[in-house]
Image: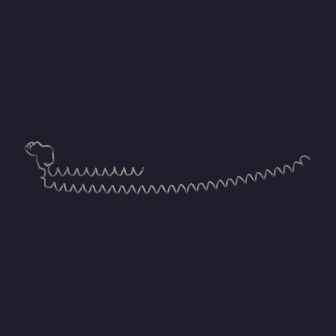
Amino acid sequence: MQYWLSLKPKLIFAGLVLALFGILFGTHKVLVYRAVGAAVAETKATLQAQYNQKLLEASERAREREQAMVSSAEKIRKEKDAQIASLNSRLGSALDGLRQRPPRADSPPKEPPAAIPRAGATGAELSREDAEFLVREAARADSLRTALNQCYRQYDEVRKGLK
């Protein structure tokens, strides 16, 4: 029993030392956990700020591109409108010039006209109605061609702006 009594202070001391190491280890773990949490929060805030800055810059660049594309499209549209106005003016002039032509005959001639050898057809023999129809169709075709060219130019501008 004496042996056990002599061990008792040693066991108590060893228990106290272990308890002290446990408290120090636990304190160390808590401090590390807090430090890591603070570092993670700081890093997250830094990354979020960088992300927000990059997003703002990208939004500004996108807005600038959009404005450039819109102004380019507006310019192309105005050019198309000017071309169509010019076409309409020429159509009006052509239609005014056709008013002196004779109208279409109600019935076909009894005998075919004498065949006169010609180098090419000029349309000079066309009646007023037929000539007006052809002039209007040509103007409509030119208007469609102008609108198609506007679409192609606008597509090319947008494509160039997205590169």
Q: How many marks?
A: 0
Quarter assignment of residue 97: bottom left
Quarter assignment of residue 70: bottom left
**Residue 96 versus residue 8: which sits nearer the camera?**
96
In-image side of 58 versus 123 (left or right): right
Q: Position of residue 114 (x, y in %)?
A: 8, 43
Q: Tell me which colouring the rendered structure shows.
A: one colour
**Residue 5 versus residue 85: which sits nearer the camera?**
85
Q: Position of residue 128 (x, y in %)?
A: 15, 52
Q: Residue at x 31, y 56 (%)?
A: 79
Q: Position of residue 113 (x, y in %)?
A: 8, 44
Q: Residue at x 66, y 55 (%)?
A: 35
In-image side of 128 versus 56 (left or right): left
Q: Residue at x 84, y 51 (%)?
A: 13
Relative height, residue 60 to residue 108 (above, below): below
Q: Residue at x 63, y 55 (%)?
A: 39
In-image side of 27 versus 137 (left or right): right
